Amino acid sequence: MPKGWRDLRSFSRRRALIDDSEAAQPIRITPHLSTNINEIELFYWRCEGDEGPMEFIFFLLVNVGITIVFFTIRRKRLHPVEIFLYWCLSSLIFQNYSAIQTMNIKSSIVPDEWSPAFAHLLNRIMLYPVISLLFLNGYCAIKSRGTKVIYFLGWAAAATSVEWLSSIMGVFVHVWLKIGWSAAFWLFHNGALIGVMYMTRLALFRRRM
């Protein structure tokens, strides 16, 4: 057999062995970030056939449950127009927050699989807006300024915890985002909703909170 053919067969065998060994290894994803931080490597340990709808089912149940909780409150302090307005506004703010992270600064990712992708979609359009409505509904019932401050900080901490739970579960995965940045976002988010509620009530209902 010519030497060239022997070399080709030898190379093919080595290539096959390498391919087989790589197939047994976990998928390793290294984001290329244009930042001044150290390179961070994100590992996904997934085996073929083990990917399932766990994330989607979990957050579907959470979304349905918290929505039922809100709509079963008999004496809501929010007008139906307000509910629609704040729902849309909260979803819009979080959508932009998510898009900036995943598309611009690359600080977070949503895995390219249907289960986490649909779970993240549910959270954007239902979970976080309903959490915001529960926050505003309770905020309207508080009279003391000191209690309002504590309530405001507590709900920002709760929303931050929910966001990081979705990261831990592989839905909205924070690659290098710090928890303090998430907390700062929710402080801004809740403060913006309070400001919009204040202006809405003055403009439409001629009443103060």
Image (cartoon, rainbow, N blue to C red):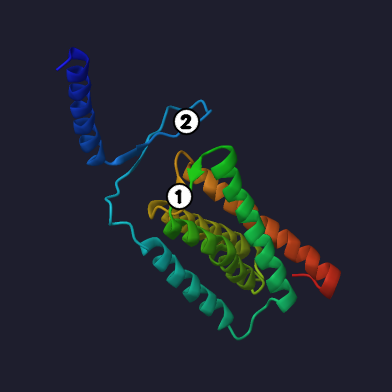
Residue depicted at 71% across the width and 78% down the height: 80
Nearer the observer: mark 2 or 1; the answer is 1
Quadrant of the image occupied by residue 3: top left
Q: Which mark is residue 112?
A: 1
Residue depicted at 62% across the width and 64% down the height: 148
Q: Residue furthest bottom?
A: 74
Residue depicted at 60% across the width and 72% down the height: 138
The amino acid type, in three-letter code, at marker 1 is Asp
Q: Which residue lies furthest to the left in this view?
A: 1
Q: Earlier in the sequence, mark 2 or mark 1?
A: 2
Residue 11 placed where, x, y %?
22, 23
Residue depicted at 58% across the width and 53% down the height: 186
Residue 24 placed where, x, y %?
22, 41
Residue 79 placed where, x, y %?
72, 78
Taking depth in this image into account, of 155 and 72 the one nearest to the observer is 72
In the shown orientation, is residue 151 left or right of residue 82?
A: left
Q: Residue 32 carries which label?
A: 2
Quadrant of the image occupied by residue 76: bottom right
Distance (Cα) linking label 2 and label 1:
17 Å
> SS for tag 2?
loop
Taking depth in this image into account, of 75 and 64 the one nearest to the observer is 64
The amino acid type, in three-letter code, at marker 2 is His
Residue 1 placed where, x, y %?
14, 17
Residue 173 visible in the current orientation: yes
Crowding at mark 1 (Cα within 10 Å: few <14, some 14-19, many 20+): few
Crowding at mark 2 (Cα within 10 Å: few <14, some 14-19, many 20+): few
